[in-house]
């Protein structure tokens, strides 16, 4: 598996919310996220956030999910809410070349007005990291903060610099064109 591996030393830093934390739980919490209305595109990472968004009529332009929450429970949501489903693989604590490729493909489809689900065999948690780098300014990523609520991460220049710094601290476990693009391209 080529891509990046998250070193143990970075886990704590990535566990912190990197956006505005909306505390609480349940679908209604998503209706409090003001940033959704002006976000283009609007993305979700995680099954509960994606399922909740769909339930309240806020189908994301791009969703990344793995069928589980907290690596255990199965979470079901309407995959029919999406125009396209892209399947990929990504092991825990990694950003695989396959995941990066799937995200790039999904973003192209989003540009064409399609709503896309990237379904990950493995773990999707770290998908937020490459998404910040790949998404345009003004995009919004919603992801769950376990036990606390939902984080609304608005993509801006500051976040892109922060994420590039984080990406460069991760361990490269095999190069691919997608990884070179992620680390150097814009």
Image (cartoon, helix red, strand yellow):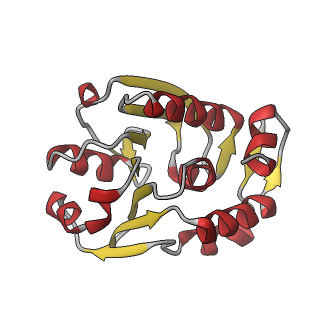
For the point 20% across and 68% down, the residue is 32
- The image quadrant of residue 39 is bottom left
Front-lying residue, 120 or 81: 81
Q: Is residue 55 left or right of residue 12?
A: left
**Residue 151 shows in this picture:** yes
Counting from the top left corner in percent of width and height, residue 126 is at 57, 53
- The image quadrant of residue 161 is bottom right
In the rendered view, would you say 25 is above or below 185? below
In the rendered view, would you say 164 is above or below 66? below
Q: Is residue 71 left or right of residue 184?
A: left
Counting from the top left corner in percent of width and height, residue 49 is at 31, 53
For the point 39% across and 66% down, the residue is 152
Image quarter (top left, top right, bottom left or bottom right) of the N terminus: top right
For the point 66% across and 46% down, the residue is 95
Counting from the top left corner in percent of width and height, residue 23 is at 28, 76
For the point 31% across and 46% down, the residue is 50
**Residue 1 shows in this picture:** no
- The image quadrant of residue 84 is top left
Q: How many dots with numbers?
A: 0
Counting from the top left corner in percent of width and height, residue 136 is at 54, 51
């Amino acid at each position: 598996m080529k891509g990046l591996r998250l070193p143990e030393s970075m886990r704590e830093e990535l566990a912190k919310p990197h956006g505005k934390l909306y505390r609480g739980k349940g679908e209604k919490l998503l209706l409090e996220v003001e940033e959704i209305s002006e976000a283009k595109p609007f993305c979700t990472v995680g099954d509960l956030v994606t399922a909740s968004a769909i339930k309240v009529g806020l189908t994301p332009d791009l969703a990344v999910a793995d069928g589980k929450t907290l690596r255990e429970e199965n979470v079901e949501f309407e995959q029919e809410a999406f125009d396209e489903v892209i399947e990929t693989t990504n092991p825990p604590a990694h950003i695989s070349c396959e995941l990066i490729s799937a995200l790039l493909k999904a973003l192209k489809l989003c540009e064409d007005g399609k709503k896309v689900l990237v379904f990950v065999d493995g773990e999707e948690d770290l998908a937020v990291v490459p998404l910040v780098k790949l998404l345009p300014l003004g995009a919004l990523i919603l992801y769950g903060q376990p036990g606390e609520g939902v984080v609304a991460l608005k993509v801006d220049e500051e976040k892109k610099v922060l994420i590039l710094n984080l990406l460069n601290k991760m361990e490269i476990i095999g190069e691919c064109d997608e990884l070179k693009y992620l680390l150097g391209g814009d």
